[in-house]
Image: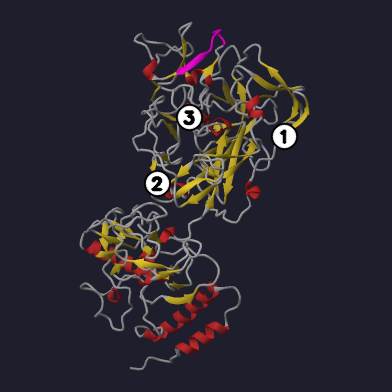
Amino acid sequence: MSMGPSISKEALLLLINNNTDSSGEAARINLFSSVLLATTSLFKRSFFWWRQPSTSFFCPIARIRFLELKLKEDNADHHDHYKLHPVNSSPHFPTTRSGNQQGDQSLLDCDQDDICKLPVVHLKYVDDEFECGVCRKSWVSTSYYACLGCKKKFHKQCVESPLEIKHPSHSFHSLRLYSQGMGNKCISCDASIYSDLFYHCTTCELFMHPICAMKSIPFVEDHPKTHPHPLTFFPTQASLVCHICGLIKNLDPTYICVECIFVIHKNCIGFPHVIRISRHQHRLSFTPSLPPGELSCGVCHKLVDNNYGAYSCSKGEAFFAHSKCALNPKVWDGKHLDEVPEEDDIIDDGEPFKRIADGIILHPYHTHNLRLEIIKAFDENKYCRGCSVPIYEGQFYSCMECDFILHESCANAPRMKRHPLRPHPLTLVAATIGPGNNEGIFYCSVCSYYGTGFFYEDKIGDTVFRLDLRCASITEPYQYQGHKHPLFLPLEPSREARCQTCKYQSYDWKINYCIECDYIICFRCATLPYKVRYKHDDHFLTICDGKEAGDEPDWCEICEGKIEEIKEREYHGDQTKELRFYKCDDCCTTLHVECLLGVNIYMKPSGNAIKDYVYFTKYSYESEGTEWIKVRILLNSSLSRPNCTGCNRRCPFPIVFKGFDKKIFCSWDCIGYDTW
């Protein structure tokens, strides 16, 4: 049967190469697609002319859709993304309709329109990164495949992944190719698997990305910076401890030096000798041998084995860290400082303000001179413009021309600083309406409070980390006034961690814990003022929790509600059990924290009518998007407390929010419930 005009593969490639300019691979793929589709309209079923010199492969998306089709025909639950399903089709594009395809029906014989029947195109990778259509990773590869049907690019390993493999680091069992089962971790790169294809050992419950599983493992590694002699791959590594990380990793390829009796994991080769981490003020250097005695890791606070290497303070201080802890991305910025001079790593730029005279300064975030004073009488309406907390005692800087004031500690906040919660240096910023912060407010990434004062910021790409001055003041170890032992920041906290004060459960590292007892306090509670003043009491009130409540019931003097009673919040939101309160032992005065300090504790008016405006982002159901709402922050100091437009109750908190149409809101949350 005549198949119409023909075109050779060599002629087609020559045509494509001659008609591709410097615009890159995208133009090449589009041109290829146009020529191929035009040619296949003539050849219909006979499109095997395009077979490359090597074996051709199916589009991996087609393999996944074919599996979903078979599961649907078998009435299997293919919508359960946590259920594992073995892939049922080979990656190889066949030379016949059936024969090397598993199952009763070949992928090529499937009549579904959304399943691609063309082989993927093998192209050379040049410069730009791309996201693989299967593993969703942008790992660099020297070559890749492109599908003319779904218009996606794929890593070579993700396309060529066979149904079953033997991995050198897991030679006891075969790894089978599966689909779905999201949320597991790859045992090679330790990243979460969000891929539609992955390898899995059902016996050992192991998972690997195809690009990790099919990566070649060299027999000899020569890395002079890591070890002076060549390192040889050792396949039976189940009992060997790495001299760098001090761990046994059955699934990390292990290399040895017989001459030195040296063992190292492949992922530990090329480790940095000098680094800086967020948990110590000096640089750390890798030490192959540690001093005798009981040593504790400065990151996880567990014992350090003296028989293996670890990181220690380059200045000679008694600070040590496990290699795996020191190189954790939560505390290390990923920079090798082996050949970087230490002076290039210093961020201290002296005093954060200009000193005009003795006791008089000019702060960069205020236009007038500030004078150092000592508080004489408490005024609840006088609050620090840096941390937005009232001035209770001690020294503070007061403006010589307006009502701007700063705690002495807030005025001395450095322009740049390092913090245990962030591996990168943070820069001091003021929340103002203008370039860089058009909302006039900020959101603390740790305590989750909104604020209007000063904060520290770190931007990396689209990721923004912000820390208010209260959270930034917590260092490690942290001496909290309400606990007798020092507190530390966990690297991997227990999922059952619950704050001692507010009793809420914490699922991340935003807590402080005691290594000597079971005391835990979250950042939201630890940063609350430990001692406060109340206008109707001459003494200081200290913060308490549920354990410190007496047998007799206590009542809040502001809301007249019972302490520790389940009550509805005075603003929109769920019911909550208020366990934090302030108490004066001399006068038996008790106050809920929110009643005294407010819900939006760190949001205060700026003192300037122009800058009092802040912007609120609200979802609009009419336009199905977000819109900006402009409101003013005002002190709630009138004799008659106004009614909140959002919750229809009297506004009990120290501040209120007022819109252009004179609507009043008692909290930031109430603004979003009103129809503007």
The amino acid beneath tag 2 is: Asn
Residue 286 in the image: x percent, y percent?
49, 51
Q: Which residues are magenta?
A: 535-543
Gap in angstroms between the C-alphas marked 3 and 1? 28 Å
Residue 576 in the image: x percent, y percent?
39, 25
Q: Is residue 328 visible?
A: no
Left or right placement of residue 340 versus residue 230 in this view: right
Residue 591 - label: none
Pick the front one: 271 or 375 = 271
Question: Mark 2 or 1, which is nearer the eye?
Answer: 2
Which residue shows up at 70% across the image and 30% down it? 610
Q: Residues within 10 Å of mark 3 (few under 14, many from 20)?
A: some
Assign the N terminus to one quadrant of the image.
Answer: bottom left
The amino acid beneath tag 1 is: Pro
The earlier-in-sequence mark between 3 and 1 is 1
The earlier-in-sequence mark between 2 and 3 is 2
535 above or below 141? above
Residue 513 in the image: x percent, y percent?
42, 32
Left or right placement of residue 653 versus residue 365 in this view: left
Residue 371 in the image: x percent, y percent?
74, 22
Look at mark 2 in the image and give the residue it sits on: 306
Does dot 1 land on a helix, a strand or a loop?
Answer: loop
Q: Residues within 10 Å of mark 1 (few under 14, many from 20)?
A: few
Residue 524 - label: 3
Assign the C terminus to one quadrant of the image.
Answer: top right
Magenta run includes residue 541: yes
Does dot 3 land on a helix, a strand or a loop?
Answer: helix
Which residue shows up at 45% across the image and 27% down it? 572
Question: To which quarter of the image does residue 382 belong?
Answer: top right
The amino acid beneath tag 3 is: Arg
Look at mark 1 in the image and give the residue it sits on: 364
